[in-house]
Image (tube, rainbow, N blue to C red):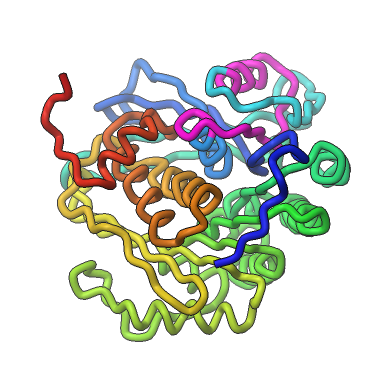
Amino acid sequence: MELKLRPAEECKYDVVSLGEVMLRFDPGEGRIRTARNFRVWEGGGEYNVVRGLHKTFGMKTAVITAFADNEIGKLLKDFIEQGGVDTDLICWKETDGIGRVCRNGLNFTERGFGIRRALSCSDRANTAISQATAEDFDFEYIFGTLGVRWLHTGGIYAALSEESCKTVIEACRIAKKYGTVVSYDLNYRESMWDGIGGLEKCREVNREVAKYADVVIGSEEDFTACLGYEIPGNNANLTDLNVEGYKEMISSAAEEYPNFKAVAAMLHTVRTASINDWRALCWSDGEISMSKEYVGLEVLDRVGIGDSFASGFVYGLMTTGDPEIAVNYGTAHGALVMTTPGDTSMAGVDEIEAVMAGAGARVKR
């Protein structure tokens, strides 16, 4: 696989993300509907990736986003700074004090347990980032003057509004103009696309973004909903996984989009909210690489598993160029993130590499 990365010395950032960052309200072991106390985190599909790439893997990262200029926006900025992600590319939007002009997004998420599934209740309409335009960020300056080796963005951001659909396409276009590698997590959310045109709009936007993507990440549902590809004869059970079906599907996509260098499919079987099976595969140059299979993982909090997969996968591709190593970085990182609360990773690269090597869960003394 050949990914042409810009030289690090030419670029201020290794990786930047484009997307929304929200406040997550976590009721711990309880329910949203009965909570009296919440623990507050920052989180967002695209941001979580660069946060992991910095905090876990030591890369220079930044987030391209927008906040309403109020105390909640400042709290979000403080969270991001604690995670070590550069905040210089944040656009601050004026607001009227009650969110009529624009506001910051909130996300209430409970973890689930056993037969009770995890539950998310978002409050994110009319946010600053959903209104932001390409001119608010000056992508020519970011990618042309500052220099960025890798851009990561995704379908959650794209689905926020008609404006974000345009902005994500423009960001990818200009990134490619300056030789930045682009990764895109399809991350299909039916409820978000329904408000701006549904499945038809989803496919229109995602198929346009796909023209600029070097690396694409998703689940089976994502590939079908966002790009219109069916996986022939697939079985959701990982032990009966139809690898050839995935290979056929991804090969068809790569024929239509010859710019694809690597495509990763996350394979997640939810036995209960507390017990999951987890692995992934990667297509590159017509070949499939499979990750280690994690069967019967005990889950504390599964939110952010896909984003942590993406950060490990991107790190593996950037540092080794080997799809098989990269997909194993991604799945090991995702598996570890399910053991801690919150959207963002608390894992260290040494822990990830130990899991990749088959380390057990005995106490480390």
Q: Is 28 located above or below residue 307 in the figure?
A: above
Locate residue 113, reporting x and y percent. Answer: 20, 39
Look at the image and tell me in which quarter the N terminus lies.
bottom right
Look at the image and tell me in which quarter the C terminus lies.
top left
Q: Residue at x 35, y 53 (%)?
A: 328
Nearer-the-camera pick, 340 or 316:
316
Q: Residue at x 23, y 40 (%)?
A: 299
Q: Residue at x 87, y 46 (%)?
A: 140
Q: Is 89 placed left or right of 253 in the picture?
A: right
Q: Is 287 placed left or right of 49 in the picture?
A: left
Picture quadrant of residue 144: top right
Q: Is 290 located above or below residue 359 in the figure?
A: below
Q: Is 255 placed left or right of 121 in the picture?
A: right
Locate residue 181, reporting x and y percent. Answer: 67, 55
Q: Is 32 located above or below residue 181 in the figure?
A: above
Q: Is residue 62 magenta?
A: yes
Q: Is residue 70 magenta?
A: yes
Q: Is 318 placed left or right of 96 in the picture?
A: left
Highlighted magenta segment, given as a residue range: 54-81
